[in-house]
Amino acid sequence: MKSAVNLVIGLACLSLASGCATIDTMRAQETYSGIERRFTVSHEQALKASQQVLTQMGLKVRDTYRIDDSASAIIAYQEMNAVSCGVLVRVVVQSLSESETAVRIITRRKIATNIFAENDFSQPFFWNLQGKLR
């Protein structure tokens, strides 16, 4: 019994100390990080559509900000529920030209050891974004 309690306490400490994702760690990610797809649309169209897709996927947009003259970022999150401690998502929309835009997405669990949290939102995100930008 005592070893089981020690195991639970040890796992709790490990999960708290190991790679928790925060808004600041998502902001600190490199602009070019994540899974990328390119679209033949303007920066503004891709940014607006990305925000809509994140919301449609059940994520809540926490922050939208300019990284530089050609790129913007959106940070969204999935709240804690019965099986997950939540997830953070960052989408970067970067103008490559007037009519071509790169969109990149990164997904991070709020607690790295949370195996029940969605680990990758890229496939459904890009599927929905492609449909919205047609």
Image (cartoon, rainbow, N blue to C red):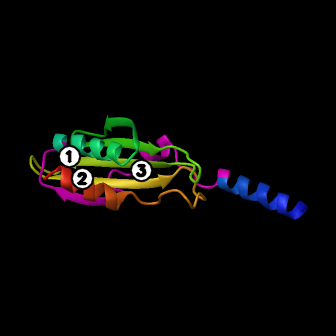
Q: Is residue 34 visible?
A: no
| Separation of marks 1 and 3 at Cα, in angstroms | 20 Å
| Separation of marks 3 and 2 at Cα, in angstroms | 22 Å
Q: Position of residue 113 (x, y in %)?
A: 61, 59
Residue type for callout 3: Gln
Residue 24 is a magenta residue: yes
Residue wearing tag 3? 29
Which region is colored magenta? 16-43
Q: Quadrant of the N terminus?
A: bottom right
Residue type for callout 2: Leu
Do tag 2 and tag 1 residues touch (Cβ < 8 Å)? yes
Q: Is residue 26 left or right of residue 105?
A: right
| Separation of marks 2 and 1 at Cα, in angstroms | 8 Å
Furthest-right residue in view?
2
Vertical relation: 47 (above or below) 9: above
Instruction: Please give the label number shown on residue 46.
Output: 1
- Look at discs 3 and 2 and give the one toward the viewer: 2
Residue wearing tag 2? 129
Q: Position of residue 83 (x, y in %)?
A: 58, 54
Q: Secondary structure at mark 2?
A: helix
Residue type for callout 1: Ala
How dense is the environment of label 2, judged by Cα within 10 Å: few (below 14), some, or many (20 and up)?
A: many
Q: Residue at x 12, y 54 (%)?
A: 40
Furthest-front residue in view?
82
How dense is the environment of label 3, judged by Cα within 10 Å: few (below 14), some, or many (20 and up)?
A: few
Q: Secondary structure at mark 3?
A: loop
Of the numbered discs 1 and 3, the one sitting upstream in the chain is: 3
Of the numbered discs 2 and 1, the one sitting upstream in the chain is: 1
- Look at discs 2 and 1 and give the one toward the viewer: 2
